[in-house]
Amino acid sequence: MDILKGIKGAPDWLPPDARTFNHVETAFLEAARLGGYERIRTPVFEPTEVFARGVGESTDVVQKEMYTFDDKGGRSITLRPEGTAGVIRAALEAGVPRSGSLPVKWAYAGEFFRYERPQAGRQRQFNQVGIEALGATDPVLDAEVVLLGWEALLRTGLRDLTLRMNTLGDRVDRPAYHERLNAYLDRFADDLPPDVADRRHLNPMRAFDSKAPGVPEIMAGAPLLSDHVSSEAKEFHEEVCRLLEAEGVPLTHDPQLVRGLDYYTRTTFEYQALGLGAQNAVGGGGRYDGLAEDLGWPEPFPGVGWALGIDRTVLALGDQVAPPPRAEVFVVAVDPSLESVAFALVAELRRAGIPADQSFGGRRMKAQLKLADRSGARLAVMLGPDEVARDVVTVRDLATGEQREVARAEVVAAVASG
Ligand code: HAM
């Protein structure tokens, strides 16, 4: 019988890479926590309409990439391809817009699903950490969000990052611009690939995303939305950029940055890691002041946020960071019969907050020391019959080989002080 395999594009994260994964996820969540963004959890599946209406019918995500199925009750269900639409759905359902303390600031982490062609940095199941600030329109809030994302990425140890920014103006700015862009695209009607041609009447801005042969060249001469936004939206954007530049964030203006989701208004941004190749966006986000209304809320309820991709960040880090070792102290039973004595010492170290481990299965001392080395532990605490009789242990520095004897009652204190 063949060994069963997992699904293509849905990777397993196992050690040692899983250690880097955890390091990245923790760094992202820590940045969010420092910003006052409280961790929430929403379901991994939603009614399909949440994404169809939230993310937008003209997007690749909705047109081609959703894992959609009918459940046994005949409802159309979709595995979340992104987090924002579901988070806003949850906020509206809980009546958050009517709460007195806005903006509400939320963070989330978890698995997301897109039926894309798997390649390096592009998977069918991937992981994001995201934040959303709901209920305020203020350039200071946008600057906070963008800066927290930047610092979250730096916190992982990643360098060689760039930040691209654009403004998409307000929805009222769109119809006139769409008309101009479509008029421009009319001139190239015969050269447009079918998916661009089909979608341009839903949203011609999607053409900026197309990498189909010839399209980027056509779009290089296209009219830009940033030249058609209101002066209010323009000033808002300039203030966001000014605040970020004052914090030393090296941002680049990219007037062609439209991003792959339809809900964006005003601020849009993307963090890119140099050296990642085609899939170099490690995170992105923006403001989405019309999304709540798309999901049925009767009045405007603005928001701004980002999502950072854990998988791509791990890829970008390569071996740039050494994640923390699995154990700090490895307790070695010099005589295998002392494994149960080691067990009590390991438990005591762990209770004192020191990551500790031991070997199992009655291995010889040499084999145990090898395991101690592989665990990444700094110290081995050795227990032999002679030591047990005298109520002492031998503490060995695994890097230098230096040894000293310590009273059994003093082990935790001795290990904690180095
Ligand atoms: P997004 O740009 O679609 O934005 O995804 C954010 C990040 O998730 C990407 O930059 C990338 O690192 C990662 N990612 C996306 N798709 C894949 C994939 N197939 N494989 C591996 N990684 C992937 C959003 O999802 C928005 N909800 C962000 C947002 C929050 N906007 C406002 N608030």
Image (cartoon, rainbow, N blue to C red):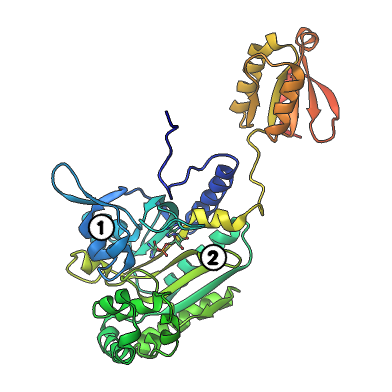
Picture quadrant of ligand 1: bottom left
Residue drawn at point x = 40 percent, y = 86 percent: 226
Q: Is residue 392 left or right of residue 31?
A: right
Residue 298: x %, y % from top left: 17, 68
Q: Is residue 403 left or right of residue 160?
A: right
Name the residue nearer the viewer: 224 or 386: 224
Name the residue nearer the viewer: 68 or 82: 68
The span from disc 1 to disc 2 (Cα, nearest Å) is: 27 Å
Q: Please say if 178 is above or below 35.
A: below
Residue 360: x %, y % from top left: 62, 18
Give the quarter of the figure containing the N terminus. top left
Q: Which mark is residue 89?
A: 1
Crowding at mark 2 (Cα within 10 Å: few <14, some 14-19, many 20+): many
Q: Which mark is residue 103?
A: none
Q: Is residue 386 among the parts visible in the rendering?
A: yes
Residue 353: x %, y % from top left: 61, 32
Q: Is residue 15 left or right of residue 135?
A: right
Q: Is residue 34 among the parts visible in the rendering?
A: no
The amino acid on which the numbered mark 1 sits, given as a three-letter code, is: Arg
Q: Which residue is mark 2?
A: 150
Residue drawn at point x = 67 percent, y = 54 percent: 320
Q: Please say if 356 is above or below 188.
A: above
- Residue 5, picture quadrant: top left
